[in-house]
């Protein structure tokens, strides 16, 4: 078969399932990986030249490529293969995948942004002597050049970041570049500084809070090889690096590595594929590996590296579990005699420990994965609850009279009288971070209290300012959602309280237990990281026997993983089985139901036709957990 070099497959920025064919007659030197401009209908579009066409059979008239974009470099072959893999594996138009790999603005280096620096200034930092565990892990990883997936399973405070830094130093010394992926929420100046202090000028960063100019500049710094280490949230994967020497994925278990909109991809899994195509090692780090990764390590697909001790033999935190049921009963019994109404969500043991820390001028963090004052506003006379007109959820009370839908931001005013029966007086039930903050203010009037949740912290600047205040000991008690459970590292923090651990247990997700366990373990990781005596964690719960709590209390990841994997195997859930969901949405409910039924019937027909599909279980259709969202069923 003769290769006609004049015709090319081009991934065009448009929602088309595959690449289009164009003629490169005017550009005999065109190479795979070049960015081109092509005509598309009546407009022009950007495209990526993928490969020459081997055989073209179609009566369509071939259009000419208009220009080779003068600015962009040739995308490396491994990266091109990766783009094609993403498109086919995640079933997304290749042109739209390609678009993620092109920076939002054109290159232009004259104008300097006057805003705060994207990369914090380096501060002098010493290079610690490695622990035996760290040294063993580093030697183990560096002894295997080329592609290999390494799971670094190290308890919180075992010094994983130091391991990353040493590995990065090695990559730099070989003249290569590296990619470090971290969850968006952990990508704080605090974390960046740890890398910059040691790796200096070689660090670039990409995350979703940068301006388009900043993002474009950082992209070019890497592509022009002015910087060597790109630290970023999942989107940093799309920076085409030619000489990739290593990929590191920190907190590899984090669900936020999965993008649920547009290109629905998992950044950790995609990073493994990129490492494979680039033939470089990839390191997945976590104190609580995802069960998928842990099983891959058990099966020998990943190299397992363990760090079981905190550095300098610092102890693991003490975890106390408080059974809220026992306090509930006592309160009822004493209600008549006791004048003072106790803050209902705060158990005496936790309250006492908070007082103790405040007296010692140490810091406290309380977590609750619910925002606002109350989750439900209900009429005690007729049972009517305030719900969102666009979504199938109840409205959350904020401040005294402000009702908000947490999904679509619909807002309403709380009236005293029930709009339904015109008799009852609406009552707020439940609690959230705002309520916790309010109650703490009246319980501890002299304490400096701050709240970290999406209502209070709406910008990156606000988050950074809050972190600065905590570091400077301008805050005594921090109240927050899981926004603050991850990755933060404060010297004065010695007590962490989980206000109500039960919230995560019953989510309609087969990973609910895993998520709860991870959250509890991560939280414990926040306490007493710099102390010679253990930090403390108090978990308040109505289900003290729940396995996530039991295993977290003894820091027993392996015990948890064994039990949970056994369950998953029995139910044929991942990592044993695979699940695919077909999600439909529309404003007309019966149209959505009809379409869902039609798809089910079609699936059954296909299963009868193709023997390979015999082993599939076809479930549903079923209503989504949120049956209506922003007006869509
Ligand atoms: P992890 O990421 O595993 O939770 P970190 O990397 O944050 O742990 O390390 C915990 C603390 O120990 C940090 O303050 C870090 O600077 C310090 N550290 C790391 N390695 C060493 C070492 N070899 N000697 C002394 N301190 C260390
Ligand atoms: Zn809504």
Image: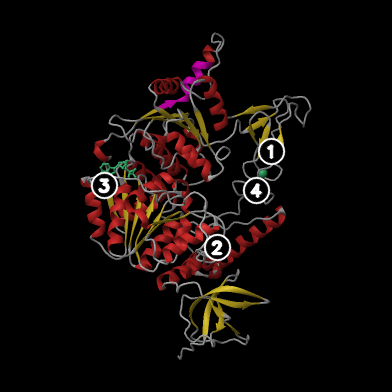
- State the separation of the CA atoms marked 4 and 1: 12 Å
Residue contact at pointers 3 and 1, CB within 8 angstroms = no
Residue 325 part of the magenta-drawn span: yes
The picture places residue 403, in percent across and down from the top left corner, at 67, 35
Q: Does residue 192 lie above or below 262 as drawn?
A: above
The residue where tag 3 is placed is 127
- State the separation of the CA atoms marked 2 and 3: 38 Å
- State the separation of the CA atoms marked 4 and 3: 51 Å
* Residue positioned most to the top: 337
* Residue positioned most to the bottom: 2
Observer-nearest residue: 421 or 478? Answer: 478
- State the separation of the CA atoms marked 3 and 1: 56 Å
Q: Which residues are magenta?
A: 321-331
Residue contact at pointers 2 and 3, CB within 8 angstroms = no
The mark nearer the N terminus, 2 or 1, is 2
- State the separation of the CA atoms marked 2 and 1: 39 Å
The answer to whether residue 300 is left or right of residue 100 is left
Residue contact at pointers 4 and 2, CB within 8 angstroms = no
The residue where tag 4 is placed is 629
Q: Secondary structure at mark 3?
A: loop
The residue where tag 1 is placed is 387
Query: Would residue 505 be seen by someone viewing this image from the given angle?
Result: no
Name the quadrant containing residue 316: top left
The residue where tag 2 is placed is 104
Q: Secondary structure at mark 2?
A: loop
The mark nearer the N terminus, 2 or 3, is 2
């Amino acid at each position: 078969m003769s290769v006609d070099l004049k015709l090319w497959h081009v991934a065009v920025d448009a929602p088309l399932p595959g690449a289009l064919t164009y003629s490169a007659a005017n550009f005999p030197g065109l190479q795979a990986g070049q960015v081109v401009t092509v005509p598309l209908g009546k407009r022009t579009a950007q495209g990526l030249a993928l490969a020459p066409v081997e055989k073209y059979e179609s009566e369509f008239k071939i259009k000419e490529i208009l220009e080779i974009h003068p600015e962009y470099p040739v995308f490396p072959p491994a990266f091109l293969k990766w783009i094609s893999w993403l498109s086919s594996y995640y079933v997304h138009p290749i042109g739209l995948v390609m678009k993620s790999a092109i920076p939002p603005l054109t290159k232009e280096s004259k104008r300097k942004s006057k805003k705060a620096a994207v990369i914090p200034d380096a501060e002098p930092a010493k290079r610690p002597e490695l622990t035996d565990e760290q040294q063993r892990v580093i030697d183990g990883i560096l002894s295997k050049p080329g592609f290999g997936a390494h799971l670094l399973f190290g308890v919180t405070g075992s010094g994983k970041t130091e391991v990353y830094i040493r590995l990065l130093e090695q990559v730099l010394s070989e003249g290569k570049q590296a990619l470090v992926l971290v969850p968006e929420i952990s990508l704080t100046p605090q974390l960046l500084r740890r890398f910059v202090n040691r790796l200096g000028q070689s660090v670039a960063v990409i995350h979703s809070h940068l301006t388009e100019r900043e993002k474009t500049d950082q992209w070019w710094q890497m592509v022009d090889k002015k910087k060597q280490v790109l630290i970023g949230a999942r989107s940093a994967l799309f920076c085409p690096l030619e000489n990739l020497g290593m990929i590191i994925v920190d907190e590899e278990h984090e669900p936020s590595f999965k993008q649920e909109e547009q290109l629905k991809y998992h950044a950790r899994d995609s990073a493994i594929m990129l490492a494979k195509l680039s033939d470089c090692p990839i390191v997945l780090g976590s104190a609580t590996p995802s069960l998928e990764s842990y099983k891959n390590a058990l099966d020998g697909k990943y190299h397992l590296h363990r760090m079981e001790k905190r550095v300098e033999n610092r102890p693991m935190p003490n975890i106390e579990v408080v059974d809220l049921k026992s306090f509930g009963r006592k309160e009822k019994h004493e209600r008549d005699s006791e004048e003072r109404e106790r803050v209902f969500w705060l158990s005496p043991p936790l309250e006492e420990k908070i007082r103790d820390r405040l007296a010692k001028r140490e810091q406290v963090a309380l977590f609750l994965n619910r925002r606002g004052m109350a989750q439900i506003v209900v009429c005690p006379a007729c049972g009517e609850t305030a719900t969102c007109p666009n979504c199938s959820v109840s409205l959350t009370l904020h401040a005294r009279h402000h009702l908000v839908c947490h999904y679509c931001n619909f807002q309403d005013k709380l009236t005293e009288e029930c709009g339904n029966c015109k008799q009852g007086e609406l009552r707020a039930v439940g609690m959230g971070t705002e309520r916790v903050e309010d109650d703490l203010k009246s319980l501890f009037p002299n304490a400096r209290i701050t709240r970290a949740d999406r209502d209070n912290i709406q910008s990156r600047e606000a988050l950074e300012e809050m972190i600065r205040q905590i570091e400077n000991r301008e805050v005594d008690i921090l109240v927050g959602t899981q926004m603050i459970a991850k990755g933060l590292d404060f010297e004065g923090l010695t007590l962490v309280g989980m206000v109500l651990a039960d919230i995560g247990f019953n989510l309609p997700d087969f990973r609910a237990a895993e998520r709860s366990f991870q959250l509890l373990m991560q939280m414990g990781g926040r306490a007493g990281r710099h102390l010679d005596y253990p930090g403390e964690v108090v978990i308040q719960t109505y289900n003290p026997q729940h396995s996530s709590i039991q295993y977290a209390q003894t820091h027993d990841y392996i015990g948890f993983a064994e039990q949970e994997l056994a369950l998953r195997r029995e139910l044929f859930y991942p990592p044993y089985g695979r699940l695919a969901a077909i999600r439909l949405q529309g404003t007309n409910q019966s149209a959505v139901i009809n379409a869902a039924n039609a798809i089910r019937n079609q699936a059954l027909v296909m299963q009868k036709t193709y023997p390979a599909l015999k082993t599939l279980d076809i479930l549903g259709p079923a209503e989504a957990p949120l049956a209506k969202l922003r007006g869509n069923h």
